[in-house]
Amino acid sequence: MLDEWTSNSLTHDPMRLYRLKRDRRHIPVSAKYNIMGFISSGTYGRVYKAECVEDGQIHAIKKFKPDKEGDVVTYTGISQSAIREIALNREINHENIVALKEVILEDKSIYMVFEYAEHDFLQIIHHNSTHRVPIQIPVLKSLVYQLLNGLIYLHSVHILHRDLKPANILVTSNGIVKIGDLGLARLIYEPLQPLHAGDKVVVTIWYRAPELLLGAKHYTKAIDCWAVGCVIAELASLRPIFKGEEAKLDSKKNVPFQKDQLLKIFEVLGTPNERDWPGVKDMPEFQSMKRLDYFTNRLHEWFRTRANHAISVYELLLRLFYYDPDKRLTAREALNHPWFQEDPKPTRNAFESLLSHSHSHSLQSQVPNPSHHLPPLRRITQDDAPSMVPMQGNINIGNGNNNAGGAGHGHGIPINAGGMGAGVIGAGGGGGGPPFGSHSQTHSKPGSSASFASLSGGGNAGGTRKKARLG
């Protein structure tokens, strides 16, 4: 009787029949991937290192957790960030952009399976800062060249990234740069709504272009190029160049004037004027800006005191830091800059010079040289969170020295610090704790927190890196 009722019900309810067939064909995440360990977590969910059962490839699985009302798990749909990241990643394909392998919906959760990377820019900065050795020019030039190459591709297909920062730029074990985390990215070709709608605040504060800080409602690809300039300066000096405190949204979600961040920029680049940036007078926060102290451009002095070894990149950085977005270098113009034509030339494997130096040094001396060492591999740990992906019996937990499948296996998932600061997966993020025990995350703070002005006789310390969230 029950079977007859069920059969009749399915006959008259095609959607129910479809869902039944779909669920029978569904392969659980735990059956497709062996979870090797936990990488890091944030507001939107958790990231795991996983091995594909079928081919042994290593991936990073980003699990978006369902919303909670108190202790009750609810399902309110897919977040805007997840929709953007899925939609854009499925349409693009480039060597210098992290690849999305598949999306799995299971138990009201979304799993995004990405290629895996052992490093990111923030981890590399932290590694060199810890050893107090600068990033060598061949490595710096190769990292920046590939970053710009990836950005040229995104801009050529009309995508603004809107959150470029060291934690979101990944590097494979064989030195290939991958731009990751498109959670804040927007398609700017015939957009359905203005860029400002729905996203009052974009780009992590230290990497945010001055036109955004001054309240611009319309902006261009130039905001990504400003962020690239900030990243280059951080790679060269091992510390953020504009490390300001972010003023938070008020109770009505109004965006406040970002006084401290603008001051950090003006201390190095000088106060903008209408001659160099005619459009500055039309910025919503122009009158607030005029009340700030006046500064002259001291970028060259900043380089001599913070990154003298990389002074050759000064002219490129100067043009990426033009206040006027229309005069700022585009990604393609930056890639064609003479700096990349000078020796040493950039290499496809950004670590190539380290590998050759490490080999020759090992033949001559038994004393290790940190400047010639590859950055350490990403660390993972076990995860005791109730929302974790079901773990397998043969969990492979390590300190990051696992076999990541060798060359070409790709890339980890960056943290999107939606408010302030740059998060990092792997470089201290969740690693090193006891298995399934408490794993308080440590976020690296490379370099000094003092502003450029404080070292020159004025100003005060900048902000600290806040706990990051997944994008």
Image: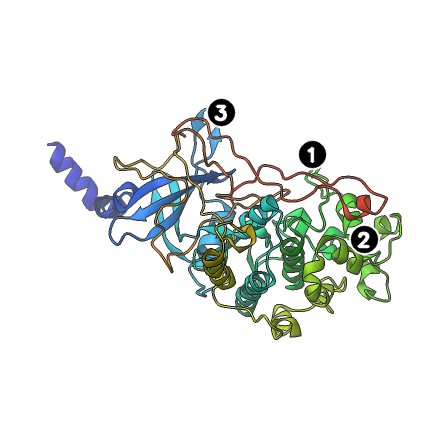
Q: Left or right: where does residue 317 sit relative to residue 169?
A: right
Colour scheme: rainbow
Q: Secondary structure at mark 3?
A: loop
Image point 82% across, 57% down: which residue? 298
Q: Is residue 273 above or below residue 424?
A: below
Between 287 and 207, the one nearer to me in the picture: 207
Q: Which of the two discs, 3 and 1, labels the residue nearer the N terminus?
A: 3
Circle 1 crowding by C-alpha within 10 Å: few under 14, some 14–19, many from 20: few
- Mark 1 touches mark 2? (CB < 8 Å): no
Residue 28 lies, in percent from the top left, at: 27, 43
Between disc 1 and disc 2, the foreground one is 2
Q: Which residue is mark 2?
A: 266
Give the label, 3 or 2, closer to the camera. 2
- Of the residues shown, which amino acid type is indicated by label 3? Gly
Give me the C-alpha separation between circle 3 and circle 2: 44 Å
Decide: few, some or many residues near mark 3? Use Cα within 10 Å; few <14, some 14-19, many ≥20.
Answer: few
Residue 437 pos. (x, y %): 42, 26
Decide if residue 121 is on the left or right side of residue 28. right
Q: Which residue is mark 3?
A: 70
Say if residue 429 shows up in the picture. Answer: yes
